[in-house]
Image (cartoon, rainbow, N blue to C red):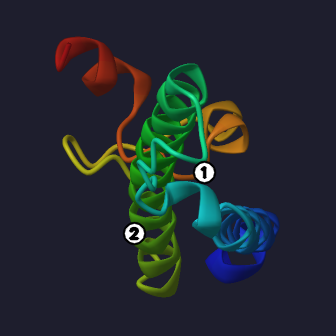
Amino acid sequence: MKQKKFEIHRKKLQCLKQQLLSDSKSTYLTRKPVELDQTTVGRLSRIDALQVQAMQVETERRRKIGLQRIAGALKRLAEETFGDCLICGEKIEVRRLNHDPTVTSCITCARESR
């Protein structure tokens, strides 16, 4: 019964996962090291290219964290512990899970851990 209750969250998590993987694939080239050939590109263009590459590397780092959180949530779904606070064991409010199905703690524990 609990599996059906959280099926919408499973679908949302799988959709988020596919979106992150797709975004990662589409930005692969912008994360590659920038060629610093001064004969073909001006100084400002090189600086701009380095800045774009640095931003894409950071975005990819955040995507990986998101994928880890999604993997954890999918694992909790499989183990039927999804929706339980990992700190106190109480149920996480449904509205909180609807907003972010990767959360691992109830609002009370989240506030206390700040």
Q: Residue at x 62, y 66 (%)?
A: 29
Numbered tag placed on residue 72 in the rendering = 2
Q: Is residue 82 visible?
A: no
Going by the image, does 46 lie left or right of 2? left
SS at circle 2: helix
- Residue at 48%, 26% in the rendered image: 47
Residue 93 screen position, x and y as percent:
57, 35
Comparing 34 with 80, the one in front is: 34
Q: Is residue 75 left or right of residue 56?
A: left
- Per the image, label 1 sits on a secondary structure element best described as loop
Q: CB under 8 Å between callouts 1 and 2?
A: no
Q: Is residue 74 left or right of residue 111?
A: right
Q: Is 83 placed above or below 77 here? A: above
- Crowd around label 2: few <14 · some 14–19 · many ≥20 (10 Å): some
x and y percent of residue 16 in the render? 72, 62
Cα separation, mark 1 vs mark 2, equals 10 Å
Q: Which residue is mark 1?
A: 101
Dot 2 amino acid type: Gly
Q: Image height check: is 7 above or below 79?
A: above
Q: Which residue is pictured at 45% across the width and 53% down the height?
A: 34
Q: Where in the figure is residue 99, as x and y percent of width and height? A: 70, 35
Q: Quadrant of the C terminus?
A: top left
Rendered image quadrant of residue 12: bottom right
